[in-house]
Image (cartoon, helix red, strand yellow):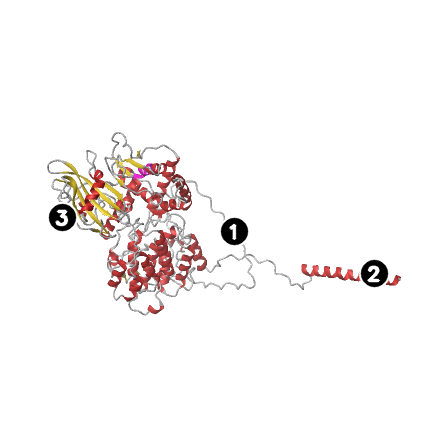
């Protein structure tokens, strides 16, 4: 029914005595596609659309028939005569576009244009098709709101996961007594089990009839006996039985909540672990979960997200419009639901060729892994709001709005003393006291004895002194290391951090609210690689890139391109990244590393006036590393050794943009680099060899040395041989003389 793979059709169903389809009563009254298709869909899904009764509530319904998906928002409605009925607004599209993650992200039904359809009055008029670009921002907001709601439905999610582990092939009718947990529970289920559950994700967040077409149906209360011949299981997710499935479900939900709270790709950890553990399709889901938890327990950090009270849970229900006419005008997703943890996608910077995207705030309330250069162990306090991507310091609001902060520069010396509050400030010595003749030191004031209070914990004993490492004898062939100048700062050497203005990057990644649409990938061929070299303007390049396939974008990035074209390509990649699966993300990571983050201009373009400034090139490289390389590093999927070599090259390059990109990557509050990368950088910065030299053994003696074992064995054998010859000669002589 859809006009193209990037569009969906609209249909409005309601009761109307003047129904244009020829039926009196309930049916389709307006649509954007062919009329016969609307009538056919109504015949298939009529029982779900007609739901009515005292328990009828706003519901989100996803049905899948053959190659099409219909997403329905159903609202109770009271007409002018006092009669009760329902209004249904449906979107019909392909399974790739209306996949379960997208449908759940649209649960608030606040996409642009939803309010323009007057459901109570629509009749006969042609409705416009809805393009994919219209649904993306609302999907991102909705998914972010569901992520925020997950901690409040942990109890219901755990019970539903346990039942799915026990009976993975059944249909379920889930009790939702609170009336606002269905969407969040479905979101958690799909996020974890999308890759290991083969059956269709069809659902109704509230229903009065237990229909076989629905895999998951949520009800507000049990209405009599369960429906017969539907193979459905009734589930009260708040009941506990204490079996193995419940124990595994509790651990899975705990890991998933931790991953959602941490972000940076960790929200996919449980789903990836389950997919990796599913070695065979016939493996029981319960055993798959047990194997996945073994991996998760080894790779995740012990910190748990702080529990939240359910009393303060945001309302995740689908509010009905006050008059039933414009349900899309609800404030859901903006005021009633919690604000998404991340910004919308795509950002405005994607559409403005001259605009500079704003960096995402990357503070976190959870302990982060600290690099080996950290001054002290322990959790890092959340950074203050900053315009810089790494949160290095406060930025004037007016400066953030501009494309670059040209007036803000770093101090001249690379070994600067940090200001108060600098993360590295605790490792710097204090200034020596002024000992000039005209300065008289003042005695410190005695604050008096401090009150004696019992410590909360017994004092720890002082650490034992660490013995100095044993001296390793150096072989004669190895030259001694060159002495380090006294005034040379450690780790800087001949490659200090350049003094460049701080600018906002243009290559901002996708908004984190627009994620988890991993099945939506464009596989088209438009000869993009061959057409890009012939473009004459950025607008022409943008038009070609927007029509290109996903793999064509990566192929174009592999080839030398003008920096402006690379910017267009990466912005389109960032817009599509939420829909890419792991193979494309890994391929993007490899391409980015191979091109060295585009941190250095090619030799032929260094004198080109259209090339960006060194500061902007460095900021873009660091931001690209953040959203294209760092998430895979955190999941252990990126080539750690190759990343370490890349950072080492950037640190030692003569170009200021390369060295500044290196410092922007490693000098943040949460660099997210594995220990192996830090170890490589430390060894190279301090001139240490990659492998430890073993103590050399005693020098081998020359074969002619009489004290060697070889000489002794040779002389012994020679003496025996000569002695034997002498004895033989004597015996022969005696025998001859006797004759």
Q: For mark 1, does the 10 Å Cα neighbourhood hold few (<14), some (14 to 19), or many (20 or more) residues?
A: few
Main secondary structure type of the part rendered in magenta = helix
Q: Earlier in the sequence, mark 1 or mark 3?
A: 3
Task: Provide the secondary structure element on which disc 2 rests.
Answer: helix
The answer to if 155 sits in the magenta stretch is: yes
**Left or right of 739 on screen, residue 394:** left
Q: Dot 1 lies on which element?
A: loop
Residue at x 45% of width, y 62% of height:
486
Q: Select label 2 or label 1 by which is in front.
A: 2
Distance of mark 2 from mark 3, alpha carbons? 133 Å
Which mark is nearer the camera, 2 or 3?
A: 3
Q: Residue 168 at what x, y percent from top left? A: 35, 39
As helix, strand or loop, the secondary structure at mark 3 comes to loop
Q: Is residue 360 magenta?
A: no
Q: Position of residue 681 (x, y in %)?
A: 43, 57
Q: Earlier in the sequence, mark 2 or mark 1?
A: 1
Q: Examine the rendering and report whether any part of residue 385 can be seen.
A: yes
Residue of label 3: 125
Query: Which numbered marker is on residue 613?
Result: none
Vertical position of residue 558 compared to residue 160: above or below = below
Q: Alpha carbon of mark 2 to alpha carbon of mark 1: how far?
A: 71 Å
Give the labeled residue for mark 2.
Answer: 731
> Quadrant location of residue 281?
top left
Mark 2 neighbour class, 10 Å CA radius: few under 14, some 14 to 19, many 20 or more? few
Q: Quadrant of residue 217?
A: top left
Image coords of residue 120 (percent x, y)? 14, 42
Q: Nearer the viewer, residue 48 or 427?
A: 48
Instruction: Name the residue carrying label 1.
Output: 467
Residue lying at the far left in this picture: please name it: 81
Q: Position of residue 544 (x, y in %)?
A: 26, 61
Q: Residue at x 41, y 46 (%)?
A: 299
Range shown magenta: 153-159
């Amino acid at each position: 029914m859809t006009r193209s793979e990037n569009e969906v059709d609209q249909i409005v169903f309601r009761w109307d005595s003047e129904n244009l389809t020829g039926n009196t009563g309930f049916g389709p009254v307006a649509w954007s596609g062919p009329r016969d298709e609307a009538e056919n869909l109504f015949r298939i899904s009529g029982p779900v659309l007609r739901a009515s009764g005292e328990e009828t509530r706003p519901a989100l319904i996803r049905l899948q028939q053959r190659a099409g998906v219909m997403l329905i928002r159903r609202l109770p409605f009271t007409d002018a005569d006092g009669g009760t009925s329902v209004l249904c607004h449906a979107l019909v599209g392909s399974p790739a576009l209306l996949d379960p993650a997208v449908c759940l992200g649209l649960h608030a039904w606040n996409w642009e244009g939803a309010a323009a359809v007057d459901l109570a009055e629509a009749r006969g008029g042609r409705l416009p098709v809805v393009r994919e670009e219209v649904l993306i921002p609302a999907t991102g907001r909705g998914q972010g709101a569901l992520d925020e709601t997950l901690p409040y439905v942990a109890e219901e999610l755990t019970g539903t996961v346990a039942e799915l582990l026990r009976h993975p092939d059944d249909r379920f009718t889930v009790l939702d007594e609170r009336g606002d947990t269905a969407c969040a529970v479905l979101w958690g289920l799909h996020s974890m089990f999308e890759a290991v559950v083969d059956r269709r994700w069809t659902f109704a967040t509230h229903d009065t009839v237990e229909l076989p077409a629905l895999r998951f149906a949520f009800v507000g209360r049990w209405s009599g006996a369960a429906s017969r011949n539907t193979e459905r299981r009734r589930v009260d997710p708040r009941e506990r039985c204490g079996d193995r499935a419940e124990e595994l479900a509790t651990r899975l939900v705990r890991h998933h909540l931790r991953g959602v709270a941490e972000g940076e790709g960790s929200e996919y950890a449980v789903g990836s672990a389950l997919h990796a553990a599913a070695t065979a399709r016939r493996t029981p889901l319960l055993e798959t979960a047990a194997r996945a938890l073994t991996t998760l327990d080894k790779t995740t950090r012990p910190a748990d997200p702080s529990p939240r009270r359910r009393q303060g849970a945001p309302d995740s229900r689908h509010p009905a419009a006050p008059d039933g006419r414009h349900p899309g005008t609800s404030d859901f997703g903006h005021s009633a639901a919690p604000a998404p943890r991340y910004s919308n996608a795509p950002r405005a910077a994607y559409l403005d060729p001259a605009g500079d995207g704003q960096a995402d705030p990357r503070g976190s309330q959870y302990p982060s892994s600290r690099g080996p250069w950290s001054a002290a162990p322990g959790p890092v306090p959340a950074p203050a709001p900053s315009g810089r991507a790494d949160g290095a310091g406060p930025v004037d609001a007016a400066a953030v709005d501009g494309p670059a902060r040209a007036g803000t520069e770093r101090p001249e010396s690379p070994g600067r003393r940090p200001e108060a509050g600098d993360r590295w400030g605790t490792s710097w010595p204090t200034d020596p006291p002024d000992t000039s003749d005209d300065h008289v030191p003042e005695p410190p004031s005695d604050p008096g004895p401090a009150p004696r209070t019992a410590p909360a914990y017994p004092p720890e004993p002082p650490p034992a002194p660490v013995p100095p490492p044993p001296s390793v004898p150096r072989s004669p062939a190895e030259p001694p290391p060159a002495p380090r100048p006294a005034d040379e700062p450690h780790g800087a050497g001949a490659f200090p951090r350049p003094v460049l203005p701080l600018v906002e990057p243009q290559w901002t990644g996708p908004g984190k609210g627009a994620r988890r649409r991993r099945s939506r990938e464009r596989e088209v061929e438009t000869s993009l690689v061959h057409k890009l070299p012939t473009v004459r303007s950025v607008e022409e390049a943008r038009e070609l890139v927007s029509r290109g396939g996903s793999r064509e974008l990566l192929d174009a990035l592999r080839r030398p391109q003008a920096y402006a074209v690379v910017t267009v390509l990466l912005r389109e990649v960032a817009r599509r990244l939420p829909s890419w699966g792991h193979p494309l993300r890994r391929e993007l990571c490899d391409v980015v590393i191979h091109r060295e983050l585009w941190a250095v201009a090619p030799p032929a373009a260094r004198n080109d006036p259209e090339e960006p400034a060194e500061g902007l090139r460095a900021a873009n490289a660091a931001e690209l590393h953040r959203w294209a390389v760092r998430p895979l590093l955190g999941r252990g999927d990126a080539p750690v050794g190759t990343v370490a070599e890349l950072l080492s090259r950037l640190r030692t390059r003569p170009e200021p943009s390369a060295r500044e990109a290196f410092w922007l990557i490693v000098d943040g509050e949460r660099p997210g680099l594995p220990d192996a990368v830090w170890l490589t950088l430390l060894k190279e910065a301090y001139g240490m060899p990659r492998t430890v030299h073993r103590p050399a053994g005693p020098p081998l003696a020359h074969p002619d040395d009489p004290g060697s074992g070889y000489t002794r064995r040779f002389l012994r054998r020679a003496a025996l041989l000569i002695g034997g010859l002498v004895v033989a000669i004597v015996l022969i002589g005696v025998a001859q003389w006797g004759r």
